[in-house]
């Protein structure tokens, strides 16, 4: 492989991993399975091992993702919290154990535990009292969630043991409780939690402990951090000690001394896991004796004395009853499979996404076919296979509509893509979805403005566009079916609050095609306010790192569209936040654009980027007429020649730059 290509590949993998880490830990809304995630990390590990020259910064292969939100109170852990190495087959488990056996010269005692799919928690007790509770965070420090944790009945506020001790385990929502909460949310028109894990993670970070208390979280404790007690020498003894100190431990823990027993235990629980009150996603295999654990030690991320055997996603066969076509907020038409309801991975499934027309072609799918489905990442059901030999004679071809199923506008196809769009900006289906998106959690976060309420408002002609939500007639709203004084007050307050959302959330909420949460954050780092975006040229967008032609085009079109501009004008008038927090920005550099070439003395690439941004400048990706300054370090590249050729670019040294920012 070409070196440049490898460096690029490593960079991309890092970015991808950081992105999925953020979704998993901060948002509790992963879009890929743990298995797929681990595959990315493995790929990166292999490349970094082979090409150590590119492994400069701290790599995500060495640290665990962080769940810490920006404004939280942070408390350092007394002893680091590690993650667990995963194994996806019993062969991997076997080879792990044979290495250990070889290492010791005998097969050690192993303690087997359920791997609870919950939210990891750290509880600190001193003098017998619960002092605080924190999340795992990045493994070194976590977020203070004491008040919420105190509402959990199975977590003792007081224990017998008087010395300082960090106690660790999982907080989880029992499946029944998860279903109850989702039913309630559905009735309120709120967004549903994808699975119990996300629901638990979302709950533990709520600002209102009263709501947490209503959610019946439970806990399973399995380990400790800081703790000194010479009497406790094994994992088994530790579990008994924890139980004697009023903690809730799992009743399924089991200590064994052969691979066969481990295999049996894994297979037993793979089969019976859906009978439990809690979701488990695997079995944790731990060397029992602490002495032996010490001998094995840790990697930068995992204990070497433990391994998580992860269950495979469950597969089920069912029948395709029909395919419906849904119109999304961007007008994209997606086929959705209507399935004969089946119970899979703990819940009943009757729909699966088919993504686009090509996916239907690829699967050669027909209506009434028997299909195999899995819940990918235990979240979104997916058809992975069509069982053609069961196809009956009356199987029916799936016809992709030529017109929008809602407004009947003829559909058109993007040039290179497989997706069909309804291009009618007034299409009622799109309007509904756009408003839902604007109000959603990652955008303006307007609680109470979910699918059902948006529909009600549209049907009663109280709104017809996004900006109308700032003019809702609440006197009238009160009188609508299922609404009242209280719901009107709550919605009014939530809408009022939304005006203070961060700038990147507003941008995300606008629903610009291809502009997701991540791109919105990138944009609001580059542009101080929305007017700068409106005035930007296509090339200004393109110059931003990570923004390619497709997104740049979409941005340019959006900010030159009359309807978008009217919407922005109206949002502005209503006081919606359309600018970045400028707190730390000293505008010395006044929007000047920089490119760096060669090695700098005082800064890494990330540091110089931060420094330039801190003083109100920006880094662009290439030398062009738009560039203001080229900073030249040691061993510069061809960029210098290019800049000299253009002429108007100022070529400066690192010292010159330091002077510019007054250092
Ligand atoms: P993962 O988050 O997929 O890397 O899995 C590692 C995590 O599983 C640990 O950090 C724990 O939070 C969690 N876990 C769940 N059950 C157990 C258990 N019985 N022992 C150790 N860790 C567990
Ligand atoms: Zn339409």
Image (cartoon, rainbow, N blue to C red):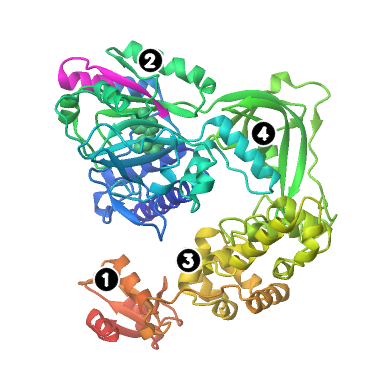
Say above or below: 375 vs 475: above
Q: Position of residue 55 (x, y in %)?
A: 27, 52
Query: Sequence order check: which comes first, mark 4 or mark 1?
Result: 4
Callout 4–callout 1 Cβ contact below 8 Å: no
Are dots 4 and 3 in contact, CB under 8 Å? no
* Residue 33 at x, y percent in the picture: 49, 38
In terms of sequence position, does the residue under pointer 3 or pointer 2 come before the other? 2
Q: Secondary structure at mark 2?
A: helix
Residue drawn at x 54%, y 47% as measured from the top left: 211
Q: Residue 69 in the image: x percent, y percent?
A: 42, 56
Q: Of 431 and 225, which appears nearest the observer?
A: 225
Q: Are marks 4 and 2 in contact (CB under 8 Å)?
A: no
Q: Which mark is residue 243?
A: none
Outermost residue on the right side: it is 408
Residue named by callout 4: 363
Q: Are marks 2 and 1 in contact (CB under 8 Å)?
A: no
Q: Nearer the viewer, mark 3 or mark 1?
A: 3
Judge depth for marks 4 and 2 and give the one in front: 2
Query: Label 4 to label 3, Cα distance in Å?
Result: 37 Å
**First in sequence: mark 4 vs mark 2:** 2
Span shown in magenta: 96-115
Which SS class for mark 4? helix
User: Which residue lies under the disc numbered 2?
Assistant: 263
Q: Residue at x 85, y 54 (%)?
A: 408
In the image, residue 112 lies at what x, y percent?
34, 21
Ligand 2 located in image quadrant: bottom right
Question: Reading the chain from its start, which is encountered first: label 4 or label 3?
Answer: 4
């Amino acid at each position: 492989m070409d070196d440049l290509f490898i460096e690029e590949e490593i960079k991309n993998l890092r970015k991808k991993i950081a992105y999925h880490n953020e979704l998993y830990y901060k948002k509790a809304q992963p879009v890929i399975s743990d298995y797929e995630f681990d595959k990315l990390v493995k790929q990166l590990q292999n490349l970094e091992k082979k090409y150590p020259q590119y492994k400069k910064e701290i790599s995500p292969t060495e640290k665990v993702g962080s769940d810490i939100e920006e404004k939280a109170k942070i408390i350092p852990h007394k002893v680091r919290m590690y993650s667990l190495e995963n194994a996806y087959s019993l062969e991997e488990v076997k080879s792990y154990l044979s290495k250990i056996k070889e290492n010791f010269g005998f097969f050690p005692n192993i303690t087997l535990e359920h791997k609870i799919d919950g939210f990891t928690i750290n509880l600190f007790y001193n003098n017998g009292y619960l002092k605080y509770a924190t999340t795992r965070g990045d493994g070194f420090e976590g977020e203070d969630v004491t008040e919420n944790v105190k509402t959990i009945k199975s977590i003792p506020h007081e224990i017998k043991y008087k010395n300082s001790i960090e106690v660790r385990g999982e907080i989880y929502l029992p499946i029944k409780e998860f279903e109850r909460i989702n039913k309630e949310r559905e009735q309120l028109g709120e967004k549903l939690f994808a699975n119990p894990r996300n629901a638990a993670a979302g709950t533990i970070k709520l600002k209102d402990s009263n709501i947490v208390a209503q959610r019946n979280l439970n806990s399973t404790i399995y380990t400790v951090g800081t703790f000194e007690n010479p009497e406790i020498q094994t994992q088994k003894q530790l579990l008994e000690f924890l139980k004697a100190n009023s903690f809730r431990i799992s009743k399924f823990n089991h200590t064994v001394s052969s691979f066969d027993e481990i295999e049996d235990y894994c297979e037993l629980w793979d089969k019976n896991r859906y009978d439990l009150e809690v979701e488990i996603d695997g079995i944790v295999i731990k060397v029992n004796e602490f002495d032996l654990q010490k001998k094995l030690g840790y990697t930068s991320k995992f204990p070497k004395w433990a391994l998580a055997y992860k269950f495979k996603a469950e597969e089920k066969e069912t029948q395709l009853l029909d395919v419906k076509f849904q119109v999304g907020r961007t007008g994209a038409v997606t086929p959705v499979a209507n399935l004969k309801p089946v119970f899979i991975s703990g819940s009943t499934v009757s729909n699966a996404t088919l993504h686009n027309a090509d996916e239907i072609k690829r699967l050669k799918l027909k209506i009434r076919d028997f299909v195999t489905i899995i819940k990918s990442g235990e979240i979104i059901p997916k058809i992975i296979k069509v069982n053609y030999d069961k196809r009956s004679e009356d199987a029916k071809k799936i016809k992709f509509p030529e017109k929008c199923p809602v407004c009947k506008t003829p559909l058109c196809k993007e040039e290179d893509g497989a997706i069909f769009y309804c291009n009618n900006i007034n299409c009622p289906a799109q309007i509904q979805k756009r408003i839902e998106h604007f109000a959603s959690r990652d955008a303006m976060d307007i609680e109470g403005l979910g699918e059902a309420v948006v529909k009600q408002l549209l049907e009663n002609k109280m709104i017809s566009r996004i900006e109308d939500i700032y003019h809702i007639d609440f006197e009238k709203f009160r009188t609508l079916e299922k609404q009242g004084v209280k719901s009107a007050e709550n919605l009014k307050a939530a809408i009022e609050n939304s005006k203070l959302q961060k700038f990147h959330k507003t941008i995300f909420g606008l629903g610009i095609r291809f502009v997701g949460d991540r791109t919105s954050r990138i944009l609001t780092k580059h542009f101080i306010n929305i007017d700068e975006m409106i005035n930007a040229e296509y090339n200004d967008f393109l110059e931003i790192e990570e923004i390619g032609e497709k997104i740049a085009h979409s941005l340019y079109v959006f900010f030159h569209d009359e309807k978008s501009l009217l919407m922005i004008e109206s949002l502005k008038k209503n006081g919606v936040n359309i600018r970045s927090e400028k707190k730390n920005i000293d505008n010395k550099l006044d929007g000047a654009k920089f490119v760096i070439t060669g090695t700098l003395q005082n800064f890494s690439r990330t540091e110089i980027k931060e420094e330039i941004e801190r003083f109100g400048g920006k880094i662009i990706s290439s030398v062009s007429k738009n560039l203001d300054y080229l900073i030249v370090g040691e061993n510069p590249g061809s960029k210098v020649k290019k800049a000299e050729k253009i002429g108007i670019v100022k070529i400066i040294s690192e010292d010159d730059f330091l002077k510019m920012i007054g250092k």
